[in-house]
Amino acid sequence: MSETVIPTTVPTVTGREMAAIQDALTTRTLTGKGKYTALCQSWLESSMPDGGKAFVLTSCTSALEIAALLADLQPGDEVIVPSYTYVSTVNAFVVHGAVPVFVDLDDATMNVDVRLIEAAITPRTKAIVPVHYAGIACDMDGIMALAARHGLLVVEDAAQACGGTYRGRLLGTIGHLGCISFQEKKVFTSGGQGGALLVNQASLAARAETIYEHGTNRGQFLRGEVPVYHWLDVGINATMSEIQAAFLYPQLQAAPDILAHRRHLWARYHKRLAPLVQAGVLRLPVVPEGAVHNAAVFWFRLADAARRQAFIAYMADGGIVTQPQFVPLHSSPFGQRVGRFVGEDRVTTRAAAEVVLLPLYSDLAVEQQELVIARALAFWDGVTLKA
């Protein structure tokens, strides 16, 4: 194996985080809701609908949990979601007794296939949870139209998607609620863990703040809007620390440069691997019209899933770490127990067995990427010549 290792992902660091952290330390407001929390939330809110409200949190899971509370779920209520996602997407709703109803993927984007959602809607359906896989937008126009027709809440799982857009709107700001991750593998990180809830429907903002304030009206009290500080509702402790917010804010300020570099790397992979698509040995991601991705990850799908482990081992021997991603939730023991899959599993299980992630991170140099590309092409050397 090569001594030089190129990992699949490395946390984003701009070099300006420590100065912000030192500044935060001088404020002595370390538990959160201070200067840097406000700056991060303002950055998010600048792209949100009028009346929208952002809350930076300990994780995207916390955002999903607040979304589940805002959905007023009762045991047996149903939530429509793709099966190819991280388990937190579904756990947040299952813990409130909801039934995850899985539908198949679109074969080109690996996002939920909007054409299949309506058949999964029943009188118990309360919400649709589209997941913007790899930072590439779902068909949000179609999803929002379906939701409006059936009176459903839309919770965007934009965990991987901060900085991506759909028809000019940032992902996470289109549904009634949006959930973002700032975990270390994402494009922007708040120092390892973190997330945000985007409340895009003004009528949900007041209760969202109450839940965020541990079920109290503390926010209103501190603003002088109410005379007494009361416990009013259920709530959770999901406050991002001010140190984490200080780590995050310089990255949000540098978002244009971070996104431009990652998109450049993503485009180079797509262009350089295109001959392998023509040879019939792999498939590359498709970005729908009107969508601009954030280059969260770069994936391809093998035409022959049986070769995935051999490819991963071959790349590892060259010092390059590649990997599969999610195991479909509907096929897991707990998923089978608490949820159901509606319609034919035409894409989900097959695609999950074919996916490979290549190295893509903010510090990845073009020269390093060239090594990855050359090694990947070499794996199929001779095969492509026969095509």
Image: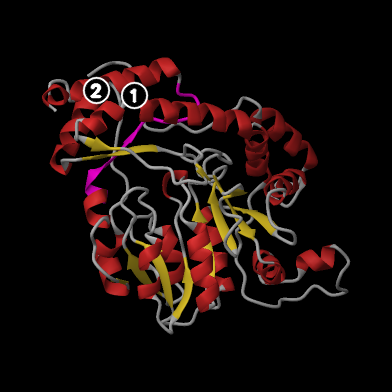
Near-viewer residue (222 or 92): 92
Indicate which label's residue lies in the foreground, 1 or 2. Answer: 1
Residue 365 locus on image (x, y percent): 45, 19
Quarter of the picture containing the C terminus is top left
Mark count: 2
Q: Residues within 10 Å of mark 1 (few under 14, many from 20)?
A: few
**Circle nearer the N terminus (1, 2):** 1
Residue 127 locus on image (x, y percent): 49, 72
Give the residues in magenta. 352-364
Q: Amino acid at mark 2?
A: Leu
Label 2, on which residue?
Answer: 377
Residue pictured at 59% horizontal, 62% vertical: 177
Residue 330 locus on image (x, y percent): 28, 64
Residue 60 seen in the figure:
yes
Marks 1 and 2 sit apart, C-alpha to C-alpha, by: 9 Å
Residue pictured at 51% horizontal, 58% vertical: 140
Q: Residues within 10 Å of mark 2 (few under 14, many from 20)?
A: some
Q: In terms of secondary structure, where does tag 1 sit?
A: helix
Q: In terms of secondary structure, where does tag 2 sit?
A: helix
- Residue 163 figure quarter: top right
- In the image, is residue 356 part of the stretch drawn in magenta? yes
- Residue 253 figure quarter: top right
Q: Is residue 75 left or right of residue 49?
A: left
* Image marks 1 and 2: residues in contact by CB distance under 8 Å: yes
- In the image, is residue 73 part of the stretch drawn in magenta? no
Q: Amino acid at mark 1?
A: Arg
Label 1, on which residue?
Answer: 272
